[in-house]
Image (cartoon, rainbow, N blue to C red):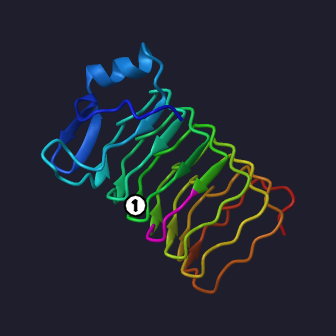
Amino acid sequence: MSPNVWENDDFIFKGDELKGMTEKGKDKVKTQGFTDMVIPPTTPEGVAIKRIGDNAFYRRGLTSVVIPDTVESIGYDAFGVCKLTEVKLPSSLVGIEGFAFYRNKLKKVEFGNKVKTIEPSAFALNELEEISLPESLEVIDTSAFYKNELTTLCLPAAIKKINMYAFCKNNIAEVEIPKSIEFLHRKAFEENTEIK
């Protein structure tokens, strides 16, 4: 990873939310080729960043990202259609909104231990072969891991709801459903040809 070239005036902030990039920040990606993103932990006023906003880095071509341990939620399509290959999510993170990491090149995701919900298509159209879901996770929403390359899956004991197509079009051979489950859509594991 290249040295951190990112400064607060590369970003747009509102309260404790990082909304997106300024023209200066966009230029660093587009013209100067800086695609290793390091998100600042605070705003220029010293406010801790708690949310990465909707579409904040959508289609920005990022190849890596460092997310600070202050972030509690990642917004809709925040990193959609980038080129990320792996991501370490902070221990502070509670919610991952729809399409947050949609259509990247993710092979590895490291979850923190507070995530409760993964919303629709959050990790759809990636290249994940295995994931270790956090024990805190309660809801895996529609198409959350649609069309990846998962071969094994261990669901956390606290899981309550798995929605339609959550793991559709993977290569999962076997999965054990925890007793905690309250709703499992009959098509949650659609098109996993080897599944038992």
Residue placed furthest toward the bottom: 179
Q: Is residue 151 left or right of residue 17?
A: right
Count up the numbered dots: 1
Viewer-side residue, 190 vs 109? 109
Kind of residue at disc 1: Gly
Image quadrant in which you'd find residue 37: top left
Highlighted magenta segment, given as a residue range: 110-115
Under tag 1, what secondary structure? strand
Q: Which residue is mark 1?
A: 95
Spot occupied by residue 92 in the image (x, y as percentages of width and height): 38, 64
Q: Is residue 44 above or below residue 140?
A: above
Viewer-side residue, 67 vs 5? 5
Q: Is residue 92 above or below residue 44?
A: below
Viewer-side residue, 4 vs 66? 4
Magenta stretch, main secondary structure class: loop
Residue placed furthest toward the left: 45
Spot occupied by residue 115 in the image (x, y as percentages of width and height): 45, 67
Q: Is residue 112 left or right of residue 170?
A: left
Residue placed furthest toward the front: 3
Q: Residue at x 56, y 63 (%)?
A: 163
